[in-house]
Amino acid sequence: MRCIVNPAQDGHSGGLEFNEGRLVPCHESPERAAMVRDAFRAANLGPEEPARDFGLAPILAVHDAAYVDFLRTAWERWTAAGRGGQALSFVFAAAGMRRDVPPDDIDGLLGFYGFDAGSPIVPGTWAAAYGAAQSALTGAALLGAGERAAFALVRPPGHHAGRAVFGGYCFLNNAAIAAQALRDAGHARVTVLDVDYHHGNGTQDIFWTRGDVQVISLHADPRQEFPYFLGHADEHGAGDGLGATLNLPLPWGTGWTVYAGALDTACAAVEAFGPSAVVVSLGVDTWEGDPISRFTLRHEHFRHIGARIQALGRPTLFVLEGGYAVAEIGRNVVAVLQGFEGAGA
Ligand code: OKP
Ligand code: ZN
């Protein structure tokens, strides 16, 4: 399978996130992508392919125009306010406050559009997020050209980014943008299957009322884990989308046996929905040694995840999400792709 790469992604770098009471270097770093690329090369999984540029239209098909405008100009506004360093929210529009009047001030805007203090905007953020979305779109185009599978090696990740919200290291929802592009290319039903450790709240938000895009997420229970305020089992979608959202929250400490059962439940739901393409939000922060997560999957289990997804028998686009054990992220991602390809089982 081909691996879509885009050097623009490396420009989102050097930020600090607010973590356990201190500012620390962002867990989500350019080295992650370099490690995955090296592992993909070493495994001889296929050629690398540069991202093509599909412009803003496919991004605006899932994101709010004013939000995209904010992201595009946030760094400019930050420097115009005399700031350097990085732009990070310190105030948020919580329950009981107004959401209908966007502030003019950059600090207010950061809190209006952001939902956490862990997603700094730096000079290269917009170009990187835009580049990642273009990589995902290139992957969708490869499926359109008849490829059975493709891998978009993207960062920053996307699944926490909603229609008009950033957070959880995510700015543009790469998987959702690709899923919508597949819809627009003629796939009547598309599934986004999210196996990242964290709930894909942004993807759920984007397709909440849509019956044509199924959103399934296996993740740490939001009672215990980020993003805390979405991802419960009783969320099923609304309107035309009722029944097209499936959340499978799992407790801290979840290992392969329980995880595999939930993955079977997820895959049965995919079969029942009957999509003609699947987009996988591929996070490997479910690994036992991940520094910010608390599942206990072992390296060999990632191959099983890939094999189970392959058994769905649908054109599949893998889009990278999380995984913060930098030294291990490459081999864990590659194990999923090898499991899918049935290589060296
Ligand atoms: C993004 B993706 C840990 C802070 C965690 C947010 C995690 C975002 C994960 N103390 N902050 O889903 O992998
Ligand atoms: Zn994650």
Image (spheres, helix red, strand yellow):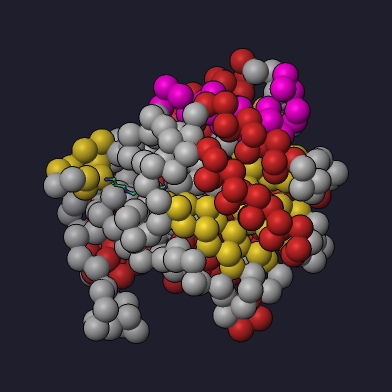
Q: Nearer the viewer, residue 321 or 68?
A: 321
Q: Quadrant of the C terminus?
A: top right
Q: Residue at x 79, y 66 (%)?
A: 188
- Report the residue that reaches farthest toward the front: 257
Q: Main secondary structure of the magenta part?
A: helix
Residue 168 colored in magenta in the image: no
Q: Is residue 174 visible?
A: no
Residue 344 colored in magenta in the image: yes
The percent position of residue 145, horizontal first and vertical second, equals 83, 45
The percent position of residue 239, horizontal first and vertical second, equals 61, 83
Q: Residue at x 63, y 38 (%)?
A: 305
The percent position of residue 8, horizontal first and vertical second, equals 50, 38
The percent position of residue 334, horizontal first and vertical second, equals 60, 27
Q: Relative to 177, does residue 283 appear above or below in the rendering?
A: above
Q: Relative to 141, does residue 97 appear above or below in the rendering?
A: below
Q: Relative to 44, does residue 167 appear above or below in the rendering?
A: below
